[in-house]
Amino acid sequence: MKETILKPKIYPLCFLLLAGFLVLFAASCTPENDRQPETDPTAGVPELMVPHAIDQDGAAVYKNNRLHLKDYSNLLHAVSIMATVSRQSEYGHENYRPELYPEKMRERAEQWLDMVGVIDRHFNGGGMAARWIDKQTGATSDPANVDLSVYPHLVYAYHIHHRSGRFEDDELLFNRLNREATNYLVTPGRYLMNEHFGNGTFRHANGDVDHKSMSYALGGLHANAYAWIVWQKPGGQDDMGVLTKAALGHHMGHTPEQMVEIYRAVAQTLDEAWDEQRSTYDFGDGTTWRLDAAGAMIRGKKAMYDFLYMFGDDGDAETSRRIFDRTAAMLNAVAPLAEPWGMPEKIAFTEDGARAASETVNLYDWYQFLNHLGGGYGFDREREGMPMYIDRHRSDLKDLIGELSDNALLGVLDYHVDGEGRLFTAVSYDNGSVTDDRLTVSTAGMFITMAGNMYRKGSAFDRASDWDNVPDDVADRSRKLHDITFDLLDRIEQAIGTSRQ
């Protein structure tokens, strides 16, 4: 999201009118066509081989001889952070790496565009994302075997798209960022609404409904919801408002009125499933939740309550506030479980408070949870025109998120990396000891993403442009944190032979 004073002149989809993209989408807005990819994802092996892990010798490790969408998606996020945070006030400042700005920053943005093209061609079947591709034959996973857990952060790819204003001094690059990724950004949300929603619930491909299907799919809608929110909010005429309501509805696949109806139906399901004593929802599978699902639910409900407030009626505004209050209650319930090394991968919501339901901290899920709170259009994102419940009613949540962020990033330095800068995959929830010392691409990618978004939420870290005005320990910690992120991305890129540093 736009965490800078610099504002893009035109929002990502607006150049479609000039580029003739209406033709591209004219045949792709029906549920039937959403099942068909624009390009056959089995046509060949991706030209970019993203591994699952990096071994001790720096070599790529492929899981089951396959290329996994999750790894591509999370590497894409890491590249986007390195591109957008390499501006002069942060990574590209003279106190840190001035050589990054502007050339290397632009190269990273171009790398992001290249990666989007690869992922869109080979994994995206009209929003139905293939879980994996055989790295020798190009064969894909069963289309019916959709993994909804990837969607909340799959759609987070809009973040560099929205930060494109940081590149507006390069007109060509700015225009490319504002149009080339459109298919990849809008089809997942359309697919979720068309194929996984019905009667107020989101279901897995097999028809089952549980806390995972509800949270992952709801989280996966937040990018589409935010496109309409930006269109509606004050100042929106300078970005999404350049498009007419009909034109934007064409690309999104759903009008605001249709999305309000979807959210109203979901709100009724949430009301029926809410367990006041446990501060969570029970969708028939109990009140033990995966941590990544809890994070996805928080992000998904953020978009939901903003949307109902901005596009609904007075009754929807009341529903919006109730959804926010329950979202805050859920966050307040789990926050005490955060140790310096993270939260357990499973949480039991009980009448006596939330309890650990796992002995393991899955670091990928922990970093996902944090990024849902403060990355892009996360829980703490509030601007004029939105209900701004945190700012107006629960400012304590800003302090809570800042504290969680500080403790988490300090914990990374103390518990999550070895002496060579390799990031672990899992640690013990009991004491932070290492239980899985592999360096996996998804964990590293999500860490880089989360750290770039969250490091200034508290007071323990600061940007390079302020290092001369903060205590030495803050500057030193910040430098060390940045070094870890650059080292991790370099390791991944060296393993796949695409290093751009």
Image: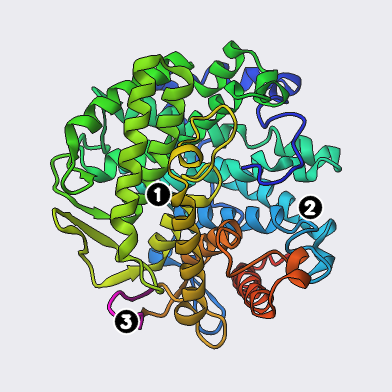
Q: Earlier in the sequence, mark 3 or mark 1?
A: 1
Q: Earlier in the sequence, mark 1 or mark 2?
A: 2
Q: Position of residue 298 (x, y in %)?
A: 38, 44
Amino acid carrying label 3: it is: Asn
Which residue is disc 2 drawn over?
A: 106
Residue 131 badge: 1
Q: Which residues are magenta?
A: 426-434
In the image, is residue 464 part of the stretch drawn in magenta? no
Point 68% across, 25% down: residue: 235
Judge depth for marks 2 and 3 and give the one in front.
3
Amino acid carrying label 2: it is: Arg
Amino acid carrying label 1: it is: Arg
Point 58% across, 53% down: residue: 76
Residue 282 vertical position relative to residue 488 in the rendered view, above or below: above
Q: Earlier in the sequence, mark 2 or mark 3?
A: 2
State left or right for residue 289 relative to residue 116. Answer: left
In the image, is residue 432 part of the stretch drawn in magenta? yes
Which residue is disc 3 drawn over?
A: 431
Q: Position of residue 459 (x, y in %)?
A: 58, 65
